[in-house]
Image (cartoon, coloured by chain):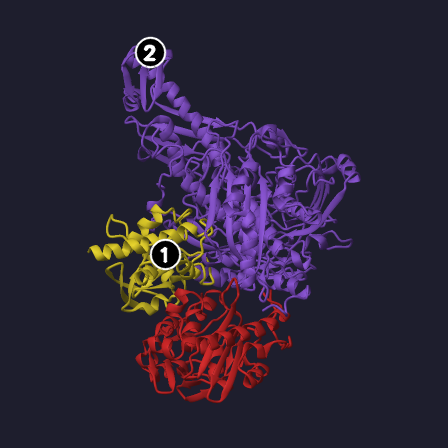
């Protein structure tokens, strides 16, 4: 079946089999391999992307259901060569090690930060319930999200 | 050199940019023209005779390229998966090495044992066909727990190993230990279990292989911590392919933790099938499949006894452990619960007599091998738990008993009764700092405050030492390793003075692109952005033994330092030629070759250019080019040590243990990048706390079915389960490598399980509790409290 | 996963006919349970009928005495809805504690109710609050709806359209999460309704159930102390690697007491 949706700011028209997952569509057919798959029980969050501005697990989202939707994956977050403030924060606060959970972690955090300009560590930790990291012990991820949230809102004010 | 980029600088990571933008290149991301998809048919039984495999119907299904079984591998002369580190047990008896076929032959020996490989055009087709493969099994009784495996009449996992014993190993002096116990004023005793774990790096394993018949060559992309070893083991022992026709690539790898340092059946089968099918073949492990195919970790049952004099001085330690090997030997299986365990039992203490026996046994479970820390967390757990038990029984403060027995700072190098020689360390200094950081003496107040909220608070302490920097080849081969464990590095200087570094180690989260750049930046005086670090490709990198056992900085970094030294030696020759000076008069500092006592000098870049565009070279003594390779084989292990302290709060009504504070003071030797070291230690601590409080790999004792077969039941630590962790480093440099580094990758995981359980036991000590098995789950802790008669009255 | 047809009807009648077309067709809400089951090949429907394209199934209506939540309303929308936060905060808190943020962004109340997972949270709220389940065929009382593990009173082809929650005087939910899955090992919803105290327990057994012993104790006196010393039978309780039956029985009492304390502390009486 054919679907049309916005992907990282551009219209996409693509034929999808009904059983195809958004993660499969992005990774296997659209070449956007920044979205990762780390589990098969919809828990790890490595596959998180935004659909209509909300974070969802692309491994549990049927591509067929995306007609008319707006999808943003990690590849669509930066503004050209300029990193998104959340990406920059993960870099500056050493919020990643192996990098596998990072795209989902960042996408999840961006949704959180939109509504939380100055989050406590506890609030960040609670939000990240759906994102596993095996390397960092989460500590620097928490700092990254706090810094990224502050930077996002500073940027918005400055703009 | 430069405080912002050299050794000691918290340089931000060079590798981050591709990861934060989704441009990493993991094995599962790889697409090859005409690529087919493979899936494994795996045994649903823990133990069964494999009567027949009928692939007829499955082969006829749409899109199926090929379906392969163990018989097909046999027909091609494919060998079993080798064990690289056997050990020798009592009576000079070598560990048993039963054949480990890449696809099961005759019997299946654990749930998940691969029996067939299905290759099809698409994943859906491959899965459909896999479901249509008809395998006839004759189920056999399964043996699951290590104690059951040793019972008389127990089911034998291998017919020719009727007692299920892989090796009965010992270390230390039994007679001296007996004598120590005979004169003891007090003996502390403890039985404990070190729970089985599944490493679960966030990136599941994957393999892509292709064969080029025109060249007779094979390429394997795999999620490996050591592609060169995979090339050797797979090429030489399993598939019998010529080494010069194999390329193994480990691109970006999403975490390893030891799980990816073994040569797995899937790597060999996928490589072999790509040749059979004449198509590139990709296999990507699904997470629940990973639970059934990744090597597991830990799984010990132990009895320990500590003999003390009346003042609490340790006189002797006796340890008996039964360790699970699983249904086959994984690559390093027998080495982990023996050499990497028993040799660590002295800890940071002067215990004069130690004797340890380990029986490694086969069971119908996944193979067990190294998982972050590998043997050393188990040793630390035994030792630090029984020290606490002794302290409690004798009424000695937990810090004081450790101080009383600690190896004094001036006693290094220190020979232990279990073969190790520690070169340096100051665990006492670490302890003092940790006690201060957590406010040890103020704990009573915090406990009272918790009690006012109905919570039980406990504090736990561990002082530890570990052996890493694997490994001095001379010692390793004496301990059974079938090869040396040196490391290599090449420094290739381009005509502009930019540098490419080729490392035999592999980075899968540790940030080597940054730290190796810092080493080179420091020594050659060039900025890190002018340095490219390459690893993980056997066609690009000379040779290397990979990354495990916290070896990359201590062994790989030392090789890199050595290679930069060679570059400087040659650079001095070139500069001497350019400056018409004698080589002895040329010095190198801050990126500049200078003639002593003159103002004559050439920059590193000048010399690099001259190296590639030689003018009037004395060719008989000076070759063009500026590329140097070095191999470094350490003379000893490195010995990080430290002190960790945890505080927990227990809800007596629900048994929930909350980690509320954690302080680590670690001596990891010279710190190359403090930011990265801090990240490694915090990550390691959280993994170790995972073992202590959350993670448990559980089999059904009778059927051998894995009960914790996905993240729905295997509890991976989450962000909201942790407080802010405080990490400090307390450096005594390693005395036998050029950088003074020891290693930081495993210390957190080694120290934290014992630390947290010591805190949990402390919180429950007033109920008469002297041990809690891991994980200290709510159900287990509530049961303990309830059995003590306190559960129902708690508010 | 196996192949199937996918349809996204725009109206309820279209959805009903799509479901009627094949006995193996299944309605799809947020897919948070169904899609993982499809991936693991634990379910093999012939077709998925995605209800999220039907406008009237989504949204929240507040009346004088009830909150009516459309079947495809997400947990995130329930958790953040100002009127629910004001009138029935226990329900908002329950919805805000389901799964994780991404599950809450997708998962729907109708999907949870129709699936009746024994460890899902919503069934406890429905049962304790005496909610009614509005469907394409009429209405079911919660008391008669949850009939067993993954079983409900829904007839084949019947679609949940909305859940009507009568607004209670007071309510609170306490959940003991599985440390791994974050589903309820035990969850207890306590509600003071026009018809008295109602207490529902999820996660503990094969299906959500009302805890009459707690209800009658709290009916005597609405205080956590009323539950001191009560012992719950382990008969029929679940046992798994995270919680054996005695632990679950114990948790029922602990969570019920905590829910009552929370309910009293909020001081909200409608």
Quadrant of image for the C terminus of chain B: bottom right
**Mark 1–mark 2 distance (CA, rounded to whole Å):** 57 Å
Question: What residue lies at 49% left-to-right and 42% top-to-bottom?
Answer: B745
Chain appearing in red on the rendered image: C
Question: What residue lies at 32% left-to-right and 76% top-to-bottom?
Answer: C53
- Which mark is in front, 1 or 2? 2
The secondary element bearing badge 1 is classed as helix
Residue farthest to the right, as pictured: B182
Is residue C77 visible in the rendered structure shown here? Answer: yes
Per the rendering, the colour in which chain A appears is yellow
Looking at the image, residue B733 lies above or below residue B432 = above
Quadrant of image for the N terminus of chain B: top left
Chain appearing in purple on the rendered image: B
Q: Nearer the viewer, residue C76 or B161?
A: C76
Q: Nearer the viewer, residue B177 or B84?
A: B177
Which chain letter goes with mark 1?
A
Mark 1 burial class by Cα count in 10 Å: few <14, some 14-19, many 20+: some
Mark 2 burial class by Cα count in 10 Å: few <14, some 14-19, many 20+: few
The secondary element bearing badge 2 is classed as loop
| Apparent side of residue B429 relative to residue B106 in the rendered image (left or right) | left
| Apparent side of residue C252 relative to residue A27 in the rendered image (left or right) | right
User: Percent from the top left, x then y, of residue C225?
Assistant: 57, 77
Looking at the image, residue C250 lies above or below residue B30 = below
User: Percent from the top left, x then y, of residue B647?
Assistant: 54, 53
Q: Which residue is mark 1?
A: A28
Q: Which residue is mark 2?
A: B618
Residue farthest to the left, as pictured: A159
């Amino acid at each position: 079946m054919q679907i049309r949706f916005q992907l990282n700011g551009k219209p996409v028209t693509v034929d999808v089999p009904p059983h195809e997952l958004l993660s499969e569509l992005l990774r296997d057919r659209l070449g956007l391999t920044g979205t990762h798959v780390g589990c098969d029980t919809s828990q790890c969050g490595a596959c998180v992307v935004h659909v209509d501005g909300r974070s969802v697990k692309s491994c549990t989202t049927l591509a067929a259901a995306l007609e008319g939707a707006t999808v943003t994956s990690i590849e669509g977050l930066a503004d050209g060569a300029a990193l998104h403030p959340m990406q920059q924060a993960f870099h500056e606060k050493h919020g990643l090690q192996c990098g596998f959970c990072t795209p989902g972690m960042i996408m999840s955090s961006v949704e959180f930060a939109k509504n939380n300009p100055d989050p406590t560590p506890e609030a960040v930790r609670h939000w990240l319930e759906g994102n596993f990291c095996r390397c960092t012990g989460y500590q620097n991820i928490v700092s990254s999200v706090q810094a990224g949230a502050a930077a996002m809102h500073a940027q918005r004010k400055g703009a | 050199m430069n405080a912002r980029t050299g050794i000691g600088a918290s340089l931000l990571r060079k590798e981050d940019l591709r990861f934060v933008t989704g441009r990493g290149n993991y094995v599962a991301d790889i697409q090859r023209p005409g690529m087919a998809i493979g899936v494994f048919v795996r045994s649903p039984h823990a133990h069964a005779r494999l009567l027949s495999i009928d692939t007829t119907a499955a082969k006829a299904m749409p899109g199926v390229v090929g379906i392969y079984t163990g018989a097909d591998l046999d027909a091609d002369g494919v060998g079993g998966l080798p064990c690289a580190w056997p050990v020798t047990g009592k009576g000079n008896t070598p560990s048993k090495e039963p054949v480990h076929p890449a696809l099961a032959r005759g019997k299946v020996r654990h749930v998940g044992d691969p029996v067939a490989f299905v290759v099809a055009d698409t994943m859906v087709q491959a899965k459909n066909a896999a479901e249509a493969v008809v395998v006839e099994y004759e189920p056999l009784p399964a043996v699951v727990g290590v104690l059951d495996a040793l019972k008389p009449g127990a089911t034998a996992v291998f017919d020719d190993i009727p007692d299920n014993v892989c090796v009965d190993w010992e270390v230390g002096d039994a007679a001296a230990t007996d004598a120590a116990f005979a004169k003891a004023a007090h003996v502390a005793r403890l039985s404990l279990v070190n729970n089985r774990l599944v490493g679960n790096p966030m990136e599941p394993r994957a393999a892509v292989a292709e064969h080029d018949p025109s060249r007779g060559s094979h390429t394997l992309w795999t999620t490996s911590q050591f592609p060169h070893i995979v090339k050797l083991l797979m090429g030489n022992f399993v598939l019998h392919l010529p080494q010069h026709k194999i390329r193994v690539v480990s691109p970006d790898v999403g975490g390893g933790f030891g799980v990816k340092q073994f040569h797995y059946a899937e790597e060999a089968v996928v490589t072999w099938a790509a040749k059979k099918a004449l198509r590139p073949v990709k296999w990507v492990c699904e997470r629940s499949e990973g639970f059934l195919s990744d090597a597991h970790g830990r799984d010990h049952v132990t009895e320990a006894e500590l003999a003390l004099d009346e003042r609490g001085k340790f006189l002797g330690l006796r340890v008996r452990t039964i360790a699970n090997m699983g249904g086959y030997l994984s690559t390093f299986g027998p080495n982990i619960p023996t050499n990497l365990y028993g040799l660590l039992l002295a800890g940071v203490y002067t215990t004069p007599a130690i004797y340890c026996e380990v029986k490694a046994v086969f069971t119908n479970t996944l193979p067990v091998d190294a998982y972050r820390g590998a043997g050393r967390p188990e040793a630390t757990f035994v030792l630090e738990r029984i020290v606490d038990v002794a302290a409690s029984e004798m009424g000695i403060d937990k810090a004081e008993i450790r101080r009383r027995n600690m190896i004094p700072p001036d006693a290094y190098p220190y020979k232990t009764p279990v073969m190790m020689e520690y070169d340096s360390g100051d665990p006492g200094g670490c302890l003092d700092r940790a006690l201060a950081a957590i406010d040890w003496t103020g704990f009573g107040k915090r406990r009272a405050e918790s009690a006012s909220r109905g919570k039980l608070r406990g504090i736990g302490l561990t002082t530890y030492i570990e052996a890493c920097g694997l490994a001095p080849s001379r010692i390793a081969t004496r301990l059974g390793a079938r090869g040396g464990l040196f490391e290599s590095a090449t420094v290739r200087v381009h005509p502009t003075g930019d540098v490419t570094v080729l490392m035999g180690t592999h980075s899968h989260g540790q940030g080597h692109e940054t730290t190796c750049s810092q080493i080179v930046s420091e020594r050659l005086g060039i900025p890190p952005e002018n340095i490219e670090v390459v690893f993980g490709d056997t066609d690009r990198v000379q040779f290397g033994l990979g990354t495990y056992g916290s070896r990359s900085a201590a062994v790989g970094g030392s090789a890199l330092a050595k290679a930069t030294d060679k570059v400087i030696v040659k650079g001095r020759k070139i500069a001497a030629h350019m400056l018409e000076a004698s080589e002895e008069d040329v010095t190198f500092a801050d990126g500049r070759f200078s003639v002593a006592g003159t103002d004559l000098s050439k920059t590193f870049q000048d010399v690099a250019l001259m190296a590639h565009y030689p003018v009037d070279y004395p060719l008989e003594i000076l070759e063009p080019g500026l590329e140097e390779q070095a191999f470094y084989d350490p003379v000893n292990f490195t010995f990080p040590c430290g002190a960790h302290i945890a505080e927990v709060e227990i809800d007596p009504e629900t048994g929930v243990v909350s980690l509320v504070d954690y302080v680590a003071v670690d001596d990891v030797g010279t710190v190359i990048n403090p930011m990265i070291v801090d990240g490694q230690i915090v990550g390691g601590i959280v993994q170790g706390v995972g073992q202590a409080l959350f993670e448990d790999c559980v089999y059904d004792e009778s059927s051998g079915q894995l009960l914790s077969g996905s993240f729905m039941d295997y509890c991976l630590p989450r962000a909201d389960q942790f407080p802010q962790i405080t990490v400090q480093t307390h450096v005594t440099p390693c005395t036998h490598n050029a950088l003074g580094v020891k290693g930081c990758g495993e210390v957190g995981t080694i120290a934290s399980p014992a630390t947290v359980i010591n805190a949990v036991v402390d919180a429950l000590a007033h109920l008469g509790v002297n041990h809690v098995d891991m994980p200290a789950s709510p159900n287990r802790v509530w049961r303990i409290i309830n059995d003590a008669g306190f559960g129902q009255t708690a508010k | 996963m196996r192949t199937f047809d996918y349809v996204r009807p725009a109206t309820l009648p279209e959805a009903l006919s799509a479901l009627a077309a094949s006995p193996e067709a299944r309605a799809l809400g947020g897919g948070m349970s169904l899609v993982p089951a499809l991936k693991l090949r634990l379910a093999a429907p012939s077709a998925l009928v995605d209800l999220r394209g039907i406008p009237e199934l989504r949204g929240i209506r507040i009346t004088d005495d009830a909150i009516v939540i459309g079947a495809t309303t997400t947990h995130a929308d329930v958790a953040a809805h100002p009127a629910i936060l004001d009138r029935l905060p226990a329900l908002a808190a329950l919805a805000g504690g389901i799964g994780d943020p991404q599950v809450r962004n997708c998962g729907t109340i109708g999907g949870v109710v129709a699936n009746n997972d024994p460890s899902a949270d919503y069934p406890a709220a429905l049962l304790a609050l005496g909610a009614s389940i509005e469907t394409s065929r009429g209405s079911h009382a919660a008391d008669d709806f949850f009939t067993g593990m993954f079983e409900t009173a829904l007839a084949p082809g019947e679609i949940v359209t909305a859940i009507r929650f009568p607004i209670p005087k007071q309510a609170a939910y306490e959940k003991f999460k599985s440390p791994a899955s974050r589903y309820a090992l035990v969850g207890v919803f306590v509600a003071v309704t026009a018809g008295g105290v109602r207490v529902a327990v999820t996660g503990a057994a094969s299906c959500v159930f009302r805890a009459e012993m707690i209800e009658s104790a709290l009916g005597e006196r609405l205080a956590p102390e009323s539950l001191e010393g009560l012992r719950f039978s382990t008969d029929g309780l679940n046992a798994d690697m995270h919680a054996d039956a005695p632990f679950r029985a114990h948790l029922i009492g602990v969570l019920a007491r905590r829910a009552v304390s929370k309910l009293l502390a909020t001081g909200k009486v409608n």
